[in-house]
Image (cartoon, rainbow, N blue to C red):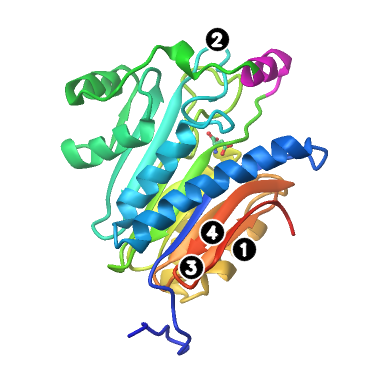
Amino acid sequence: MVPKSARGVPRPLWALALHGGAGHISKDMKPTRADAYRTSLQRALELGRTILAKRGTSLDAVEAVVRALEDDKLFNAGKGAVYTHSGKHELDAAIMNGATLECGAVAGVRTVRNPISLARLVMEKSTHVFLAGPGAHSFARSQGVPVVDNRWFDTRRRRNKWQRTLLAEELGTVGCVALDTHGHLAAATSTGGVTNKRWGRVGDSPIIGAGTYANDRNCAVSCTGRGEQFIRNTVARDVAALVEYRAMPLADAAHGVIDGKLQPGDGGLIAVSKSGEIALVFNSAGMYRGAADSSGRFETAIWET
Ligand code: ASP
């Protein structure tokens, strides 16, 4: 039997949304580059769809999708991450299990190939929630996760951007949220942060309640944009609170926070509710994004349509 939402509308058995960053995405982008983004988003969406359609868990789906986007050099996470002020890469990631409220996060990681999987290990194999810098590396070594030289994350495109950039610029963080057929939600976000960042700067992505949040009682959220703004406004948790305490439809809650609390151009978020609603909301020029669910929805987009 197909489950019904409170309004009697059949609700999807599973739902998935992903993002590849929000920000000033120029519409003058070369069509071949836009096609490359669409292809990458579709491939990642397909990966998540396959896991959820086979009754896999939302946690496995969000980790697998984010790993794929981390390995894709188009995005600012893992391979292709932006450069810090000193010409290195420092990666942040977080994952959250909405069924248990367990979560794991890492910040300032320099050699772990897939930070999202390290975040999951923090959640599942440590007694802590958030590990940063050298401690995160020691933990990574103890878990035997694949490590690479920091230069492995290099790409010519990001290097050129770094050399041209005087002000901090961000774009291309990745994230995924999912509802599985068991009724559980999960969220994951991974990023290289902002170009030219200094002094161990950490953004919203690995901070539970700011850039990442999942709770089976309400929704799963992954954010992207000017991290400091998302931290100040505890954006992910605010959306969840509006859904839970005000019983708001997911899209209204997401718009309420993105349009009502942030400044134009700050960024956006993706979210999935416990009833399978999907929200893809941003106040920047564009957001690389995709959505799929068990009712047959499968779409990707970059700009407002
Ligand atoms: N929110 C990320 C950060 O501030 C960057 C981004 O989403 O583009 O680290």
- CA–CA distance in space, label 4 to label 2: 36 Å
Mark 4–mark 2 contact, CB under 8 Å? no
Q: What secondary structure is marked by label 3? A: helix
- CA–CA distance in space, label 1 to label 3: 11 Å
Q: Is residue 217 left or right of residue 164?
A: left
Q: Is residue 164 covered in magenta?
A: yes
Give x and y (percent) for residue 222: 48, 50
Q: Amino acid at mark 3?
A: Leu
* Residue that badge 1 annotates: 255
* Residue that badge 2 annotates: 86
- CA–CA distance in space, label 2 to label 3: 40 Å
Please tell me which residue is depicted at 62% across the width and 63% down the height of the picture: 255
- Which numbered mark, 1 or 4, is in the foreground of this view? 4
Please tell me which residue is depicted at 67% across the width and 58% down the height of the picture: 259
Sequence-first disc among 1 and 4: 1
* Residue that badge 4 annotates: 291
Q: Residues within 10 Å of mark 3 (few under 14, many from 20)?
A: some
Q: Which residues are magenta?
A: 157-167
Mark 1–mark 2 contact, CB under 8 Å? no
Quadrant where the N terminus is found in the figure:
bottom left
Residue 59 vertical position relative to residue 134 in the rendered view, above or below: below
* Residue that badge 3 annotates: 242
Sequence-first disc among 2 and 3: 2
Q: Is residue 181 left or right of residue 21?
A: left
